[in-house]
Amino acid sequence: MKILITGSSGFLGKNFITHLRGRNVNDFEVFDRSHSLEFLKKSIQKCNLIFHFAASNRPIKESEFQEDNVELSRIIASEVAAKSDQTKVIISSSIQAELQNPYGRSKLMAEKHFQSEFLNTHHQLIIYRLKNIFGKWSKPNYNSVIATFCHNVINDIPIIIDDPDKILNLIYIDDLVENLMQHLDLDIEEQGNTDIYSYTASLRDLAATIQSFKNTNVIDRVGEGLTRALYATYLSHKSPENFSYPLVAHDDERGRFVELLQTRASGQFSFFTAKPGITRGGHYHHSKSEKFIVLSGDAEFKFKHIISKDSFSITVSGSNPQVVETIPGWAHDITNTGNDELIVALWANEIFDQKKPDTFYEELL
């Protein structure tokens, strides 16, 4: 199977090709604005699986809709129709093909060229009518409103929304590419599934979520669903000089404490150091819990039940990683028992609240 991808330098094309290479699929031809029509026609003759992504959606001149969307599709459809070997063509159209605007009409005409040319042939046509695609490498003020929001927030440009309550149906680029990948394995006669999982959100909620990413010290639930996709898209719009940011370090005679990250729903992450012989802690919590891991050095954790006064200790070394948990109602401290600096990572199940710290002094002997 030989593959041709048109629009290879565009938003969808770049993501699709990157996924192909990630799957070690390298036997494909590409076509973009730098290639001639003669090159395109020769590539069509060599390929029996064509992903036609090339199009204009915000051209400088309206006539480009006709040239890039309609005429190019007509040429590809005609060339494929004349082939003797079976060829499958997957085209990226738009839900705007249902609308009477210049872009929508051009996409509908492109669809009709393929449908008429393939009529009574053995070639297969699969049409994806796509909607509001977003993801990495999307262009602000061109591909999607989400790209524009991300660009504006990162660069401190105000977001202007005419209709905050407008609901958008969205497709994340990785979900779309994953769906497109099925056509690499399908038999030529099979249609496949063109229903892509989509998200729904208002412009107001999209803007608010993306604006929340600006606060690098507090992070939302970015591990699943729409927020995961929005966060990945937001990060992809960062320039290299913004790939890192400073943290506040609190130093005293005991060592250093640095808060790494707060989360809106899953507590916070920190690390601290302790000099040899130094003990940190010496308190208990009513509800708060923590997980400690010694990254470097040797330490002794001591515990005492605040009611029964039962006590015990745990010896830990960075050479043998293990988690030590603090339990509500048990006082605890940690002592550097080694000769080198102790480095400890810490997760707490809640964000520290200066007004209600849930931290009470209790000496451990």
Image (cartoon, rainbow, N blue to C red):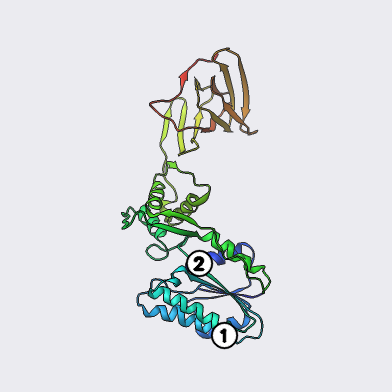
Q: Quadrant of the C terminus?
A: top right
- Up-down: is 226 above or below 332? below
- The residue lying toward the viewer, choosing from 79 and 281, is 79
Residue 223 on image: x %, y % = 53, 47
Q: Earlier in the sequence, mark 2 or mark 1?
A: 2
> Compared to 269, does 131 lie above or below?
below
Identify which amino acid the numbered label 1 is placed on: Glu
Residue extending furthest toward the right: 187
Give the amino acid at mark 2: Leu
Residue 141 place in picture, x, y as percent: 37, 64
Specify the quadrant of the image occupied by residue 302.
Answer: top right
Residue behind mark 1: 79
User: For the point 42% across and 65% down, which residue is it?
Assistant: 143
- In this view of the protein, which residue sits in the foreground, 358 or 320? 358
Q: Quadrant of residue 338?
A: top right
Query: How far is mark 2 from mark 1, CA to CA?
Result: 23 Å
Residue bearing the label numbered 2 = 12
The percent position of residue 251, horizontal first and vertical second, equals 42, 30
Q: Judge left or right: residue 59 versus residue 298.
A: left
Point out the image quarter for the N terminus: bottom right
Q: Is residue 333 left or right of residue 319?
A: left
- Residue at the farthest top position: 308
